[in-house]
Structures are given as structure tokens and as C-alpha cells.
Image: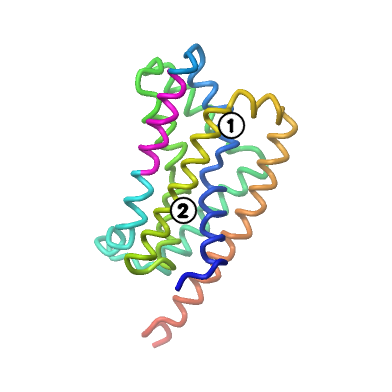
Amino acid sequence: MLSYEIVFNAFVTLLVTIDPPGLAPIFLAVTRGMTREERRQVSVRASVIGFLVLALFAIAGTVILAVFGITLPAFRVAGGFLLFFIAFEMVFERRNDRKEKISDVAVRRDHIHNIAAFPLAIPLIAGPGAISATVLLSGAFNGFTGQAALVGIIFVCLVLTYVVFLLADRIDNVLGQTGRSILTRLLGVILAALAVQFVADGIKALISAPGATG
């Protein structure tokens, strides 16, 4: 039986790593010149692709790790460090700079022809941080019911991302530069705390694993 705390922490972790508010100005940048209908189509496609990628790792993430001989506690420690690095970038506003560079390259190369798949869906929505968080969380969502719950959480996060894309121009005007900066830093601090918890849980599991001290 999944507790409310586990479900809520999973939702917060995924929402923070995907960071829909942080993607709003990037979405506006890469869809510059598009009509409202074209932006809506891009929003739908990017959200669907991002959902499919994260759902795959939610269902088969542990299997993929097993193929490479990686234990979940080891991945939890590594993923926790990665999430902490992302949080560090968010707090010091380095993550948005990196995202903007990725989006600029995509605009020059593809001229927004396939902008929904790259860079919006991958790597901005379903990036290394979100994928790592999904695999880490899958350890607490066992069985069919647990996997279904995690996929449902991912679905809710992507629906919120889709809504943010639709309202991107309004959200950007409301937040402004100061608002975006404050929100990004606040989410970064929350993610940093969650990342530390991931590392602590992973180390604890590694130490208590059979043969760890033998």
C-alpha cells in the first residue's frame, strides 16, 4: 500500500526536475513565429513524447539497470548526486542558460521543423534528471499497482507541463524576470533536499545489503 508521503514526494520530485515554469520561456523561444494552433500542436506532441519516454523508464527502468549489472541503491546514489547538481544549477541560474543554448542550436538546425521532439521532449522534458528521478522512484513503486501509480504521477506532471506550454506567454508576463528567478531558486532548494535524501537512502541500502560488510 503506497503512502500519501511516497506519492507526494514522487510528484514533487518529478515536477521539480521537469520544471514546467522554467520551460515556459524556452517554449516561447523555440516556437517564435508560430501561430497559436501550431504552438498547441507542438505542446501536445512534446508532452506525449516526454510522457512515453518517462513511462518507459518507470516500467522498465530497473530491468534496464539489471542488464548493465547496476543495483538500484547504486543508481540511487549516482542519481541523487545528479539531481543535486541540477539543483545547484537551478539555485545559481545556470540551468536556464544551458537550456537556452540547447534550444538555440535546435532552432538553427531544424528551423522548428521537429521542435516538439527535440529539444522540447528530449532533453528538456525527459532529460537526464527526470529520467534518473523516474528510475529512482520506481524502486518505491513495486508491482503493477505501484507502476501504474508512478505512470499516473508522470501523466499528471506532463498534463501540467502541457497546460504551462499553452499558457506560456501569459505565465512569462506574470512572473517576469524576477519571478522566474525566485521560483527557479525555490524549486532548486527543494530538489537539493530531495537529492540528499536519495543519496542517504542509497548509501544506507548499500551498507545494509548482504555481503556489503563481508
Q: Is residue 103 above or below residue 69?
A: above
Three-letter residue code for mark 1: Asp
Q: Is residue 16 magenta?
A: no
What residue would you read off at disc 2? 153
What residue would you read off at disc 1? 97
Front position in the image: 93 or 12: 12
Q: Which class describes the residues within 10 Å of circle 1: few (<14), some (14-19), or many (20+)?
A: few
Residue 23 image point, x, y percent: 55, 33
Residue that appears at 37% across and 84% down: 210
Residue that appears at 46% across and 21% down: 39
Q: Is residue 172 above or below residue 7?
A: above
- Give the structural element (helix, strand or loop) at label 2: helix
Q: Is residue 48 magenta?
A: yes
In this view, the residue farthest toward the bottom is 214
Instruction: Give, as a single range, the part of the protein colored magenta.
Output: 38-51
Q: Is residue 60 above or below residue 103?
A: below
Residue 198 image point, x, y percent: 53, 64
Front position in the image: 171 or 81: 171
| Distance from the alpha carbon under mark 2 to that under mark 1 | 28 Å
